[in-house]
Amino acid sequence: MKRSTATTRRIWMYECMGVCFLTIIQAFSHTIILSLVFCSTLFAQFQLPKYENYILENGLTLYLMEQHEVPLIYISAIFPAGAVWDESKSGLAAFTADALLLGTKNYTKKQIEETFDFLGASISSYAGKETAEITISFKKSDLEKVLPIFIDVITNPTFPQEEFDKRKKRWLAELEQAKESPRRVIGSYFDKFIFGSNVYGNAVSGSQSSIKDLNREDLQGFFGMHYRISKLGIAVVGDFSAGEMKNKIESMFPRTPSLDQLNLTIDVNKDIKRFEKSNVLLLDKDDSRETTFLIGGYGVSWNNKDITQIQVINTIFGGRFTSWLNDELRVNTGLTYGARSRFTNYKNAGTFYISSFTANKTTIEAIDLALEVLDRLHTEGVDEATLTSAKNYIKGQFPPRYETSGELADLLTTMYFYGLDDSYINDFEKNVDEMTIERANEIITKYFPKENLQFVLIGKADEIRDKIKKYGEVTEKKITDDGF
């Protein structure tokens, strides 16, 4: 029987609807499958990539991690040669590390710079509070060109007088310029205020007077004392064969340690202050329109067993843009463009601080509000939704911190110096997931200082001097005074 035109159209319409429906179902199913695959990847426990670890005959500790995705290699070297070893010559460690690139036994400063520039490679050296680090990155094909320079830099620097004099002049100018920016220098003032004459109070950059007094013989002596091969850790990450790299590095360093290797130690507990009251350090910058401040005290060292869970709570309090501190001081009140909190970890010590800046006229309002938020953390604690949000955030932020070869090499040298094992990475997410409300509030009580807080402020003293006396006994200095 012949179908009518209307019937044919209806059948065609229903067939089209059926095809569309099936297409939608298939697409939806495909999306679900992709989502499940993505989620399984996203929530898989992040693990430290495979690497090999050797202690060579000369005492050098070597880490080798093959990463063949791109033809690049990153090498990081670390020595126990930071500012804690400066003694009476403030800035000596940092200057020595910087000056490694001024020339070596076999390469001038110009040759080093031109070689790395021509190859599109990079080299840097610097010292921090506890360590000195030298890093290079380069194309795999340029290994034979850059590795000899790298090794000469860390074994045979000559600190040529002409280059030393020029760098010293620039260093002094940089010190002067730094104090024009309170946020660049307030950390040095805070460390000195917290640690006093203890080695952790040493300013990495030194002072005008201490740098003026340095000579190249000081650098040579510091290098000879602290850049010992037996204390050296090297991490190589990238596109190479581990066996070949190990043989190459072994062949380019002395086979045995020198006879006069020293077991260097410092008394990290000497002269540590114990705060029985709150104190305030006011740095007068008489042309300042705003006040920059840090509030805090002692924190924890790298090997603290609760370091991961401390990070979770700090994420809530002041460690991300949506933290309580930033919400209150920036979003809700507009007192500042940013407020945060941080734990700085060292090998045998650490600090905790709240940091922000505000107009001179709103200094007290901003500080009071920051203290109110800290009090709320202690009195109210955190709820389940807030804790879950922070846990998800910190787990999501963790893997991207170790995506590149450079980041992985820096991680391995950090693990070497601070004595961290693979569990620091491999158990990170497990330690985060194990946090409960009860545990979170224990962490707050134990590690987030509330009493006897120490205050460091940089601003126009005439506008805030009398108002800040309520926070504690005030010590006042001019920011233009030498040192910290």
Image (cartoon, grey):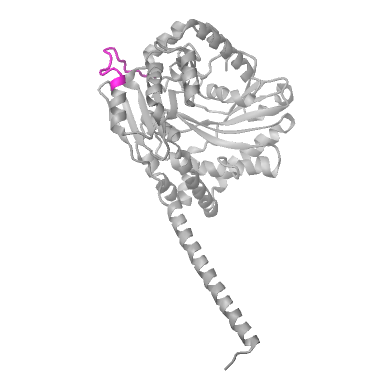
Location of the C terminus (image quadrant): top right
Q: Is 250 situated left or right of 203 in this image?
A: left
Q: Is residue 22 magenta?
A: no
Residue in the picture at 63% in, 82% down: 9
Image position, residue 269 (x, y; %): 42, 23
Most common SS among magenta residues: loop
- Image vertical order of residue 3 relative to residue 141, above or below: below
Give the residue drawn at x 37%, y 23%.
144
Q: Quadrant of residue 295?
A: top right
Check the image and name the residue furthest to the bottom. 1
Where does the N terminus fall, quadrant-wise? bottom right
**Is residue 198 in view from this perspective?**
no
Closer to the camera in the image, 41 or 221 = 41
Task: Tell me what residue is drawn at x 31 percent, y 15 percent.
Answer: 262
- Inspect this view and state whether residue 342 appears: yes
| Residue closer to the observer: 429 or 150 | 150
Tell which of 241 and 178 is nearer to you. 241
Give 114 or 185, whichever is nearer the viewer. Answer: 114
Can you give x and y, in whole percent of width and height, for residue 97 in the image? 46, 17
Asked if residue 292 is positioned above or below residue 403 in the image, the reply reads above
Which region of the structure is painted magenta?
251-266
Q: How many tags in the picture?
A: 0
Q: Is residue 284 left or right of residue 201?
A: right
The spot of residue 91 in percent (x, y) is 50, 15
| Picture residue at 53% right of the left edge, 21% below the top | 192
Q: Does 324 appear above or below 157?
A: below
Q: Position of residue 407 (x, y in %)?
A: 45, 34
Which image quarter: residue 323? top right
Vertical order, 473 against 7 (above or below): above
Name of the residue lying farthest toward the front: 2
Residue 261 lies in the magenta-colored region? yes
